[in-house]
């Protein structure tokens, strides 16, 4: 399988983040998915519509992030859940993509890992209207509950049940990436 590049959005700044570990696992279990830009989401300034409309005012992080989004074939969002919603970093990153068309037609995988029983899944629901507005194509999600008990000493997810679940979701993402690439191919209607 040819390598597929996906934009990674990590909604956590925490050292040893479970959600950053999920993005690493996506690459590990895939047949050739490369996650780019994942470290940028936490470095973006707060979204400012005045700045968004003036490209000359964009900080370098915004330029890099939007360039990664433009080049990516798909998206993987790994966000923790805070107060039954996504991390503010996650929504801020998406806000920077609204004017770019950066997710239009892009297969998108939502993932979350949390020490709690819900695994962060309540972070997904508020993101869905925004992702739909941005034209993302949502695929199966991956949720890891009790994340702290499911990582090894180095913070990697190695438990077979977690690896298998993420592998299933990534398989759907890869299938959707293949369909999206086929639709973009020259001569395909």
Image (cartoon, helix red, strand yellow):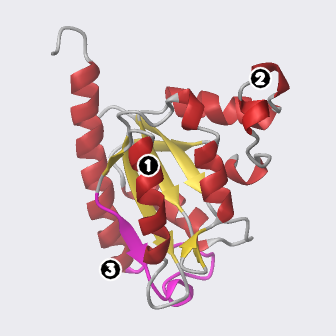
Kindly indicate the quadrant of the structure image that contains residue 167: bottom left
Residue 66 versus residue 131: which sits nearer the camera? 131
Label 2: element kind: loop
Q: Residue at x 24, y 35 (%)?
A: 178
Q: Is residue 43 above or below residue 126?
A: above
Label 1: element kind: helix
| Left/right of residue 180 with respect to residue 89 in the rendered view | left
| x and y, in percent, of residue 108 in the image | 39, 48
| x and y, in percent, of residue 171 in the image | 26, 53
Tell me where the magenta segment starts and ends, as one range. 140-159
Classify mark 2: residues with Cα within 10 Å, few (<14), some (14-19) or many (20+).
Answer: few
Marks 2 and 3, how far apart in space? 47 Å
For disc 2, the marked residue is 54
| x and y, in percent, of residue 185 in the image | 25, 16
Dividing the image into 4 quarters, which one contains the C terminus?
top left
| Left/right of residue 92 with respect to residue 27 in the rendered view | right
For disc 3, the marked residue is 161
Marks 3 and 1, how far apart in space? 28 Å
Marks 2 and 1, how far apart in space? 23 Å
Determine which of the numbered discs, if any, sits on residue 131 in the image.
1
Q: Is residue 94 above or below residue 184?
A: below
Residue 48 versus residue 102: which sits nearer the camera? 48
Magenta stretch: includes residue 69: no
Q: Are marks 3 and 1 in contact (CB under 8 Å)?
A: no
Q: Residue at x 62, y 45 (%)?
A: 95
Label 3: element kind: helix
Q: How many marks?
A: 3
């Amino acid at each position: 399988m040819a390598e597929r590049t996906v934009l990674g959005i990590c909604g956590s700044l925490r050292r040893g983040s479970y959600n950053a570990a999920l993005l690493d696992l996506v690459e590990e279990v895939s047949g050739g998915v490369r996650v780019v830009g994942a470290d940028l989401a936490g470095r973006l300034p707060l979204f400012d519509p005045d700045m968004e409309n003036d490209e000359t005012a964009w900080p370098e992080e915004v330029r890099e992030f939007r360039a990664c989004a433009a080049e990516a074939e798909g998206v993987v969002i790994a966000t923790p859940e805070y107060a039954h919603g996504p991390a503010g970093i996650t929504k801020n990153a998406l806000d920077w993509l609204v004017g770019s068309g950066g997710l239009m037609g892009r297969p998108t995988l939502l993932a979350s890992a949390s020490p709690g029983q819900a695994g962060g899944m309540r972070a997904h629901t508020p993101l869905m209207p925004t992702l739909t507005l941005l034209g993302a194509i949502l695929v199966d999600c991956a949720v890891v509950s009790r994340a702290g008990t499911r990582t090894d000493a180095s913070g990697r997810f190695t438990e077979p049940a977690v690896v298998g679940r993420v592998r299933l979701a990534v398989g759907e993402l890869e299938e959707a990436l293949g369909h999206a690439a086929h639709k973009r191919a020259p001569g395909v209607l």
